[in-house]
Amino acid sequence: MVITAGATRFVSDVHLRPERPDITERFSRFLVDCIEKRIAALFILGDLFEYWIGDDNLDDTFNALVASKLRKVSDAGVKLFFLHGNRDFLIGAAFAAATGAHLLPEVAVLGLHPLSVGADGTPPDAGTAASAPILLLHGDTLCTDDRAYQDFRRQVRKPEWQQGFLTQSLPDRQNEVNLLRQRSTEAVRQKSAEIMDVNAGAVRRLCAEYHCRILIHGHTHRPGCELLDTDPPCERWVLSDWEHDRGDALETHGQKIRRLDWSQ
Ligand code: MN
């Protein structure tokens, strides 16, 4: 799929939840802005929702509202892509159908010349120098120092775990997720800042594997940009999360990337 005309935007970690209508309202304005500015494609790099207990909960008032806003974006001609975060990894085909979003694999590769994405997340012209790949991922897989989290991730990504979870009733799933969120908040409080950031070696290995020029991820809630002295050199862009005083997006302009402030 070639995405040529217009700019492309990337956003991550919006953590939408019914308790925070202010964030939902700000994100809605961002979506309308994507339509008005005729953005070619919007990539959501995970944790769009604070939690997602299954696509069979799409009828929930809040979820239906968000899905309808995303639908307007794809109906307006903005190509919509979604990549799973650690909180909404259960988003599936029904959500994609409802919103018009294309689901991407864990690591998605974008070609830059022209901006393009293959069905399996690899660019049609992968491997050529002209493709100058942009690598997209949520970012949690780079936090390899957080062993406890990586163990948890391996468990919940197993099909057996997911089948077991999804066969429970919606209220039971909601209760389990509430417990997990509580435990996660406590665990995060006890972990050091270094453990919860990306591992530099993991980043370099990923860049080497894909020969990427640009790496874009979220998850760590540490917005920034660094130039890595990899071969080829790679710009690592980190998106912020959306909270009461912060929220951003990245936008491509030709081969350049700039950060958009959506904190207000
Ligand atoms: Mn995350």
Image (cartoon, rainbow, N blue to C red):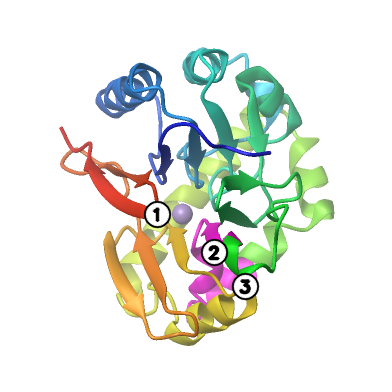
Placement of 98 over or under 114, stated as above or below? above
Q: Residue at x 51, y 72 (%)?
A: 142
- Which quarter of the rendering shows the N terminus? top right
Q: Looking at the rendered structure, which numbered label has been put on residue 56?
A: none
The picture places residue 6, in percent across and down from the top left corner, at 43, 32
Q: Looking at the rendered structure, which numbered label has been put on residue 132?
A: 2
Q: Looking at the rendered structure, which numbered label has been put on residue 255?
A: 1
* Amino acid type, mark 2: Ala
* Amino acid type, mark 3: Tyr
Q: Is residue 20 left or right of residue 2?
A: left
Label 2 sits on a secondary structure element that is: loop
- Marks 3/1: CA–CA distance: 18 Å
Tag 1 and tag 2, C-beta contact below 8 Å = yes
Q: Earlier in the sequence, mark 1 or mark 2?
A: 2
Q: Looking at the rendered structure, which numbered label has been put on residue 210?
A: 3
Q: Earlier in the sequence, mark 3 or mark 1?
A: 3
Label 1 sits on a secondary structure element that is: loop
The picture places residue 160, in percent across and down from the top left corner, at 84, 53
Between tags 3 and 2, which lies in front? 2
Task: Specify the segment rendered in magenta.
Answer: 131-152
Is residue 81 visible to the viewer in this orientation of the structure?
Answer: yes
Closer-to-camera residue (9/28): 9
Tag 3 and tag 1, C-beta contact below 8 Å = no
Between tags 3 and 1, which lies in front? 1
Q: Quadrant of residue 14?
A: top left
Q: Residue at x 38, y 73 (%)?
A: 197
- Marks 3/2: CA–CA distance: 10 Å
- Marks 1/2: CA–CA distance: 10 Å
Label 3 sits on a secondary structure element that is: helix
Dot 2, crowdedness within 10 Å: few (<14), some or many (≥20)?
A: many
